[in-house]
Amino acid sequence: MSPPPSRFRHRLASLLWLAGTCWLGTSLAAAPPATTTPTALAAQIDARIGQDRFTAASWGIAVMSLDSGRMLYAHRADHLLQPASTAKLFTAALSLATLGADYRIPTRLLSRGPLRHGRLDGHLILYGMGDPTLGTGENADWADRLAGQLAAHGVHSVHGNLIADDSYFTGPSFGSGWEASDLQSWFAVPSSALSVQENVVDVTVTPDTAPGQPASLTLAPHDGIPVVLGQLTTTLPNTSSDINLYRAPGTDRLYAFGSVPAGSTPQHFRLAMTDPALLAGRELRQALTRHGISVSGKLQVLHWPQDDAGLLAHASTLGEVLSPPLLDILQRGLKRSQNLYLQNLLLTVGAHEQARTADPASGFVTTEGYAIRALQSLLAQIGIPPSASMITEGAGLSRRDLVTPNALVRLLGYLAAQSYAVQLHDALPVAGVDGTLVNRMHQTAAAGNVHAKTGSMSGVHCLAGYVTSATGERLAFAIMLNNYEPAADAPRAGSELDAIAELLANYRGGE
């Protein structure tokens, strides 16, 4: 989930797809003049990026043949640029290398209390470990499944509190370098070990039928933001809407003010949930009631830096639901550029590394910090030097993230040599087909051919992935444009990147 544009050595001989894989695109329209040499290709790309409107901008491009290992084109390919959501490719590589494509993230019901005659004497703990898919897809009924498993143990009452514990991730609930002004927005929701419904609240504003009356504001889930203050007023028909929604970072109060015209259709907004773990606890408590299980105590939420070591010591698992396989999570996250999914995957890696390598004598390190250490180690193995990749979080929301085009292409080459290469290739957005590229490169040789991750923030526009040339040569590319916003009469920034990808799709190779 990239923010809207208003606001992402290893041996080259190993760069092969799985045997028998077909990876070819189909040209749907008349192609631009074909190039048959790298020199001619370079001249075409240079002509595009050398136009006057890019005088103050920063381009960085690298194109490598996965078949020969040869660099076909490079422009400032060793310069650091902001990657925006193309940084998600680093999280994908790290999570696959550390956890494996088939890894499933558990969410557990725990207790250390004795069970006698259907009564559990002790606290019941809902323990999150980072699954970002609770409340979606096949995990929409996660709470009822856990409640059903508890009932299957013979439990009909809990004499203790229900504790929603999301302290598995140690550190703030936002990525390093995320901007405070983004934190109420749908694309910068809190990263929680107990995430539910993607940690998003849908807000609907509906005018009254009569001017001067309050407009209604509804939330789904209704308790996703606990406090709503202020008032939206209904104004005369055919006037302009002026809807303002504001929640200060770190607070749970949403202020709504302004006006909406009578007779207008309801307007919809998406905001960040304030406390996903609390909502998860409420959903579980309701599910327990549906399954005939009463809880005598209160609902309690446990967040880092609260310590749960004593609570978890010697606790038994009474229920568990699993996420989809990691590769499935990646596909959902990469297609949509879903920030929560990738940040939670980074933190899940960090939690595993923390459990494996933590040394109290070295002082406190956040879960994110452990993950970034693991990423740096992986990149060193690939042959990407520290000076070429400065990633600080998992989603690409931070402007502290800096990457060179060459580093991105080396990473893509590494990914193309792994056992999951075909699945990851298919998990990327496909030009003109799906994900964040669904509306791009239609009726060109790139359509259905380019599989690439997009990245966009204010002034940042990137595209990195794979394309097959007109002669079947498999290419990895990174196209990065920083410090650029198009003028009103100029082509949109994304089309500038697409034009270069189309040149690669039409490239006919040769010497």
Image (cartoon, helix red, strand yellow):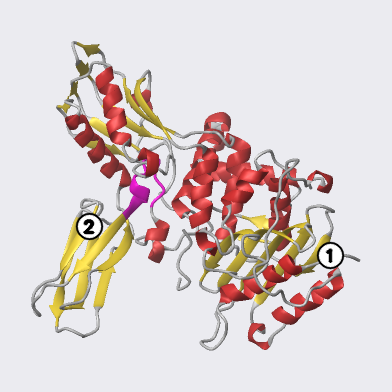
Q: For this rendering, which residue is in front, 401 or 266?
A: 266
Q: Which residues are magenta?
A: 190-200
Query: Position of 319 compared to 31: left or right?
Result: left
Q: Residue at x 37, y 39 (%)?
A: 139
Q: Residue at x 82, y 61 (%)?
A: 71
Q: Secondary structure at mark 1?
A: loop
Q: Residue at x 65, y 61 (%)?
A: 450
Quarter of the image for residue 251 reads bottom left
Q: Residue at x 16, y 26 (%)?
A: 292
Kind of residue indicated by mark 1: Gly
Quarter of the image for residue 39 reads bottom right
> Which residue is label 2 attached to?
219
The picture places residue 78, in percent across and down from the top left corner, at 75, 64
- Residues at discs 2 and 1 in contact (Cβ within 8 Å): no
Dot in front, 2 or 1: 1
Query: Position of 60 compared to 287: left or right?
Result: right
Q: Residue 509 has which mark?
A: 1
Kind of residue indicated by mark 2: Leu
Report whether residue 90 is seen. Answer: no
Report whether residue 414 is seen. Answer: yes
